[in-house]
Image (tube, helix red, strand yellow):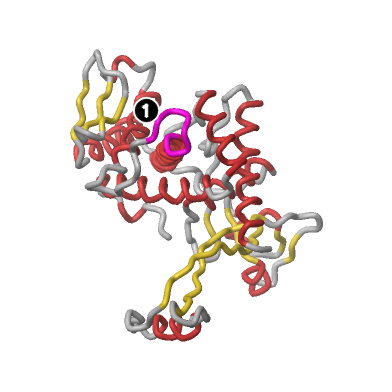
Amino acid sequence: MNTNDIYEKITNLIIELLENHIESDYTQSWFELSTNEVFAKNIVSNHIYNGINQLLLSFIKRQNQYSLNRWLTFKQIEALSGKIKKGSKAAPVVYVSHIYIDNMTGKSRTKEVEELIKHNLSYNHLDVKKIGYLKYYNCFNVTCVENLPESFYKIEEIEKLSEFENDERIEQLINNLDVKIDFSAENPASYVPSLDIIRMPLKKQFKDKESFYNVFFHECGHSTGHESRLNRNLKGKFGDKFYAFEELIAEINTAFICAFFGIENKITDNVQYINNWLQVMKNDTHFVIQAASEAQKASDYILQFAKVQEFIMEE
């Protein structure tokens, strides 16, 4: 499968997720919080998947009604003498690989560069350009595999923080953020890039704390795009691709952070946003994968202020 086919395959899955959300009358979440595990992870390495892979695997879990969000590769299954159940389908995990092309000859010098990188040596003396391309491998949900270690199937009680503890952790993050926050009864929720300020209504104006935190983390996601932070294009106008891209980044960022703290997060019910995303995705298969990657960077940036970095999803 070539790179373009991979982009199309992944994009079609996310389009299906959004269309399912519309069919469910906008009640569907990005992540299920009712199960014992929120984030998809590799059960052998304990690696927590990130970016687009986190969205994909969590969606495929829900779509197929798997009881666990644990995954492993075909090679890992073979090494453990596991047996894939008849009829089970693989799920894709995507990643970026690179080739290195000589600027003078146009020939590949990838092996030479990779050998230098392998030995922690610089390749800056070589006149090459680095070109990224998308690759993927298949993995299987643990419930689709037999004869694995018993611990792989063990369902443990979900670890939930008390209401006070949960609020305290999030409030600590808010107090530590490197952006000014203005709470006012007259404020609509917004981020103003020119002033680098988040404007929020008062907490009591929201129907519950989940609603408040969802809106706050959305605006906080936008703030990470400031030139002093992750430096994204924040000059898009409603209806254009740049605006849709930034809104999707903020939305997925919110989903990652809310899931991290165990807060229910629904995919937006803003019909204009969703239709805009769908329109762009159907014309640009790179759109959602790039947005999820930027959202992961945004949530990682924000979560560093929570002083719980050991739980941040790793690359």
In the image, 84 versus 293, the foreground residue is 293
244 on left or right of 84: left
Q: Vertically, is 83 above or below 312?
A: below
Residue 38: horizontal and vertical position, in percent?
50, 44
What span is colored magenta in the figure? 236-243
Residue in the picture at 37% in, 52% down? 312
Foreground residue among 20 and 142: 20
Q: What residue is rendered at 35% in x and 43% in y?
A: 233
Left or right: 168, with 237 as reference point: left
For the residue pair 36 and 214, the one nearer the viewer reads as 214
The amino acid at mark 1 is: Val
* CA neighbours of label 1 inside 10 A, class few (<14), some (14 to 19), many (20+): many
Q: Position of residue 12 (x, y in %)?
A: 65, 44
Q: Disc 1 marks which residue? A: 215
Queried whether the magenta region covers residue 157, the answer comes back as: no
Image: 234 above or below 120:
above
Q: Residue furthest front?
A: 104
